[in-house]
Image: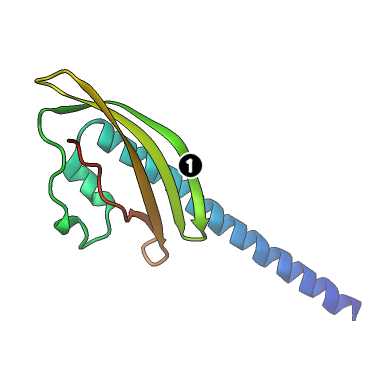
Amino acid sequence: MVRNVILIVAVTALLMGCQTLSERKQSDALQEILRSYEAMIRWGSVEQAKGFLRPGQAGEVEATTPENVRVTQYEVVQGPAMLDSSRAMQTALIQYVFEESQIVKEMMNRQTWEYDQESERWFLVTPLPVFK
């Protein structure tokens, strides 16, 4: 009887450890994808930023960054925060300037990300930022 209880406790501990390892891997993947996305937006690579969208969703997106826009700042102001086990949200303040006017503008960019278990990858499900 005691032996069965010890076995059950050991198996439960092992399963909890595996789940924690899986959650850690998912969290690390989120941090990495958010850093990469920030770099794409920061350097104005909208075509490459479309790669963060789910396959099929990227074809529906128009190029949203005119060539005369330069992003001057990308600052995460909230998040990333997990909404549930496979969805996360982050809010970033993006400052940018139209080169011909040199007027600095800013926008709040709220992003929702979903984790795809099959591909083990995070995808952006909200639209790319539009610079107006």
Quarter of the image where the N terminus is located: bottom right
Residue furthest right as drawn: 2
Q: x and y percent of residue 117 in the render?
A: 42, 65
In the image, 15 versus 30, the foreground residue is: 30
Left or right: residue 83 compared with residue 13: left
Q: Is residue 82 above or below residue 72?
A: below
Label 1 crowd bin: few (<14), some (14–19), many (20+), radius 10 Å: few
Name the amino acid, label 1: Gly
- The location of residue 85, given as percent across then percent down, is 52, 60
Q: Nearer the viewer, residue 43 or 66?
A: 66
Q: Which residue is mark 1?
A: 79
Position of 96 compared to 22: left or right?
Answer: left
Q: State the image quarter where residue 48 is shown.
A: top left
Q: Is residue 102 above or below residue 31?
A: above
Q: SS at mark 1?
A: strand
Q: Residue placed at 23% from the left, 31% from the top?
A: 43
Quarter of the C terminus within the rendering: top left
Image position of 127 with respect to 101: above or below? below
- Residue drawn at x 47%, y 38% is 78
Which residue is painted at 39% across and 58% down in the image?
114
User: Could you say where residue 83 lies in the image, as x and y percent from the top left?
Assistant: 50, 55
Residue 111 or residue 108, whichever sits in front: 108
| 72 sits to left or right of 84 | left
Give the image's coloring scheme: rainbow
Q: State the residue in front, 41 or 19.
A: 41
User: Residue drawn 16% across and 18% down?
Assistant: 102
Question: Where residue 87 sits: x, y (%)?
Answer: 45, 57
Q: Is residue 84 left or right of residue 118?
A: right
